Image: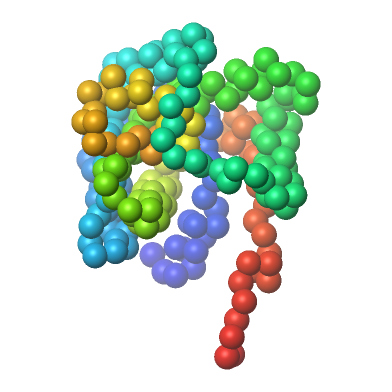
Amino acid sequence: MNLNDIEKLIEQRRSVRAFLPDAIDRNSLEAILTCARHAPSGANLQPGRFHVLTGSALSTLTNALSEAIEQNRKPVSEYSYFPPVLSDELKARQHEAGFALYKALGIGRRDTQARREQFARNYRFFDAPVGIVVSIDRDMGKGCFMDLGMGLMSLFVSAQSRGYGTSGIGALANHADVVHECLSLPVQEMVVCGVALGLPDHDHPVNRVRTTRAPLDSFASFHGF
């Protein structure tokens, strides 16, 4: 694989929200997670754990999460994913992404029930054959979240290089207590997010959604060149 191939993998990566039911073999998953662990890590602390579920283990978790949603169980997320106040620029990006998603699915702006149901699919890992719960030790500093993020990107690109699709699921942390109960996680582990992984259903309209990225001159500056 040359440099152009790597760049194409990164540029073509998309959040996949519809999957084929085909099972993923454990050897492939082990290779993907080993690649994730090769991401940069300050002081080589290697923060984060990956709890990989499939079959009945995944169904048990998704069923418990669905029940929590139906019961309007109070969210318990332990960290703030978004800033407390979104600037106009960030709101525009958020709205653009949401509009593209719901348009692809044929969901109208005022169809709150359909939007709620679509969001609930996060808690089913978008019906992917593999769901990964990502956690981190509570004593890790904020910088370790950055290292974990680099590990997740390595996971996504490694999966894509093997023909699999992925989607990060930050909403999973909203019901971390349910995840803890189902997986019997140690109290010391904080649930950060989930990852859906499997073969993409390329014919599903939700996988045709494309979001834009800011132009280079809006986020980068060069000095001394």
Q: Is residue 70 left or right of residue 220?
A: left
Residue 43 appears in which quarter of the rendering? Answer: bottom left
- The residue drawn where x is 50% and y is 27% is 122
Q: Position of residue 155 (x, y in %)?
A: 36, 49
Q: Is residue 74 above or below residue 167?
A: above
- Measuring 75% from the left and 49% from the top, which residue is drawn there? 88
- The foreground one among 139 and 195 is 139
Q: Taking 108 as reference, is 204 left or right? A: left
Q: Is residue 217 above or below residue 207?
A: below
Residue 139, compared with residue 72, is above or below; it is below
Q: Residue at x 52, y 37 (%)?
A: 16
Q: Position of residue 99 (x, y in %)?
A: 73, 36
Colour setup of the view: rainbow
Residue 33 appears in the figure: no
Work out whether residue 53 or residue 189 is closer to the camera in this orientation and state it.
Answer: 189
User: Residue shown at 42%/44% (left/top)?
Assistant: 163
> How many numbered markers are drawn?
0
Q: x, y percentage for residue 104?
A: 70, 32
The C terminus: image quadrant: bottom right
